[in-house]
Amino acid sequence: MISTATTLAGSNFDNCMMNASGVYCMDSDELLAVENSKAATFVTKSGTLQPRKGNPEPRYFETEFGSINSMGLPNNGVDYYLDFVSQDQINHPGKTYFLSITGFNLAEDLELLQKVTDSDFAGVVELNLSCPNVPGKPQTGYDFETVDAILKAVFDVYHKPLGVKLPPYFDIIHFDQMAEILNKYPLSYVNSINSIGNGLYINDDTETVVIKPKQGFGGIGGEYVKPTALANVHAFYQRLNKDIQIIGTGGIQTGKDIFEHILCGASMVQVGTALMVEGPVIFERLTAELEAIMAEKGYSSIEDFRGKLNYL
Ligand code: DOR
């Protein structure tokens, strides 16, 4: 009997797959579509204190090898997602959901968490420290001192399951430094990676960028980013305390990609660009493909190979 079940942040999930925040999670219709798919659970779009319209369109574009986006955090506001998830919990007892939140400074992060504390939400919070697309706002995850200060303040007041969504890092010293910070805190998990920020995709025929915000600069996802995602998952797997788990996000299009993320140490995976392309039915294909690989290799659970990457 082959199982793709996993445990994360103290909850059991009957599959190790879910959506990545930003994809199929903007409103109740999209969240319910993921809810009713083969995915184990869902994460909401990152909720801000106030609803946001986001950046001007076009702001998302699919390419042969992935996507570029500069959405600019359009969302219905944290209250909307809190209400939806709190209700969904009642409808599905025993299921655990993820609420993504993002403030524009520490005070906002704390205000968002206060709202979570005051609500009936019983799931896992994913604090997004890595949006690359708000003009004038740098990606928090690249400011190591600020990450440290945020996590200190967050865990002074918030004691329920919480993970962080990180940007990709590209230097070994940055993996070392960030892991040292993360290891100081009772994080449930780190989620690597957000999109690779500020790429540029152009149309040669028209000699023009393909998205409007920021003169075409945007976050890159899809096949382009898998090697960077795997490197971040494995670098953190090597460095983090074993009680901080890892969600692998980036470049997942097939069951083989999921197998590789798990081999690098991920306990759960999230699907972004490919979910956008195929819709929530993708989770059926991904589950069948992962199970076929596991069957061929003689693995019955993801713990049989999780983190067991070999070196030369
Ligand atoms: O690529 C991304 N786009 N990452 C985020 O964290 C936010 C999103 C957006 O809304 O721009």
Image (spheres, rainbow, N blue to C red):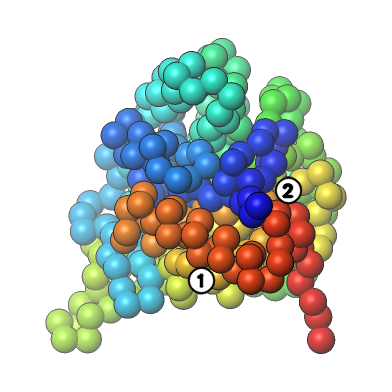
Label 2 packing within 10 angstroms: few (<14), some (14-19), many (20+): many
Q: Nearer the viewer, residue 134 or 166?
A: 166
Q: Mark 1 packing: few (<14 Cα in 10 Å), some, or many (20+)?
A: many
Q: Residue 291, position in %: x, y?
A: 57, 60
* Residue 285 locus on image (x, y percent): 43, 60
- In the image shown, does 231 or 150 lie closer to the viewer? 231
**Residue 188 visible in the current orientation:** yes
The numbered disc on residue 245 is 2
Q: Nearer the viewer, residue 180 or 9?
A: 9
Q: For mark 2, give the secondary structure.
A: strand
Examine the rendered structure and indicate whether residue 276 appears above or below residue 150. below
Specify whether tag 1 is near ligand 1 (CB below 8 Å).
Answer: no
First in sequence: mark 2 vs mark 1: 1
Q: Which residue is painted at 55% across and 70% down in the image?
A: 256
| Position of 275 relative to 254 (above/below) | above
In the picture of the structure, the residue carrying the numbered disc 1 is 225
Point 32% across, 31% down: residue: 28
* Quadrant placement of the C terminus: bottom right
Left or right? Give the position of 49 relative to 122: left
Please state which amino acid type lies under the numbered disc 1. Val
> Left of 249 or right of it: where is 297?
right
Local SS, label 1 = helix
**Which residue occupies the foreground of this view, 173 or 225?**
225
Up-down: is 190 above or below 290? above
Q: Residue at x 69, y 26 (%)?
A: 160
Report the amino acid beneath label 2.
Gln
